[in-house]
Image (spheres, grey):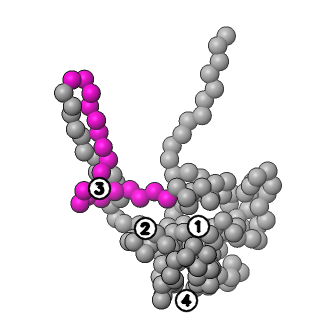
Amino acid sequence: MLITDPTSPDFNSYAAADDLTSFLSSRGINAPASPEPLLMQAMDYLNGMNWYGDRTTLSQPLPWPRSGVLFDGHYYPETEIPRQLITAQCMLAVEAVAGDLLGANREAAVKSEAVSGVVSVTYAVADNTSFTPTYPAVMAILRGLAMGNGFAINATASRS
């Protein structure tokens, strides 16, 4: 059973089954007979993300609500669940229809191919091997709320 009340000690989902049904309907996708397991898989994925700010209380069961989240130049209210988070959970629930979002081995398989001469080409492929799924649309929706899952270095260079 999905409990979407952040004040409940059993709070376990940002999105309700009706949220997923509306999300799917607006995109012309048929809703599954049992949306709850898909939303729970999506929630499991979201729970593993790195979020900006801090949990509002240490004992809350889910990462949100959060305090200290600066979003578009304003601090996000500590008592609210962002609409983007509900949408992201619905997007991930759609992905969960195709399979497990959190498989045990999700590293990309690498295949190398040498071409005569000085050129060498390497491909990351999924030919009966495992792969790392990415959800760029979900990360785009959560920009400003969640930290990226990659690595980046920002640097400025100047000539004297």
User: What residue sits 39% from the left and 72% below the top?
Assistant: 98
For disc 3, the marked residue is: 126
What kind of residue is marked 4? Met
Using the rendered image of the protein, determine whether residue 141 is visible from the camera's viewpoint. yes
How packed mark 3 is, by other alpha carbons closer than 10 Å (few <14, some 14-19, many 20 or more), is few
For disc 4, the marked residue is: 1
Q: Would you say the residues marked 2 and 4 are in contact, meaning their CB atoms lie under 8 Å apart? A: no
The mark total stands at 4
Left or right of 121 in this view: 39? right
**Label 4 element class:** loop
For disc 2, the marked residue is: 101
Observer-nearest of 101 and 24: 24
Work out how far the residue at label 2 is from the one at label 1, CA to CA, in angstroms: 13 Å
User: What residue sits 62% from the left and 59% below the top?
Assistant: 142
Q: Nearer the viewer, mark 2 or mark 4?
A: 2
What kind of residue is marked 2? Leu
Residue 3 placed where, x, y %? Answer: 62, 85
Work out how far the residue at label 2 is from the one at label 4, CA to CA, in angstroms: 20 Å
Work out how far the residue at label 4 is from the one at label 1, CA to CA, in angstroms: 20 Å
What's the magenta region? 117-135
What kind of residue is marked 1? Ala
For disc 1, the marked residue is: 88
Left or right of 93 in this view: 106? left
Q: Looking at the image, tell me whether mark 2 or mark 4 is earlier in sequence order.
A: 4
Work out how far the residue at label 1 is from the one at label 3, CA to CA, in angstroms: 25 Å
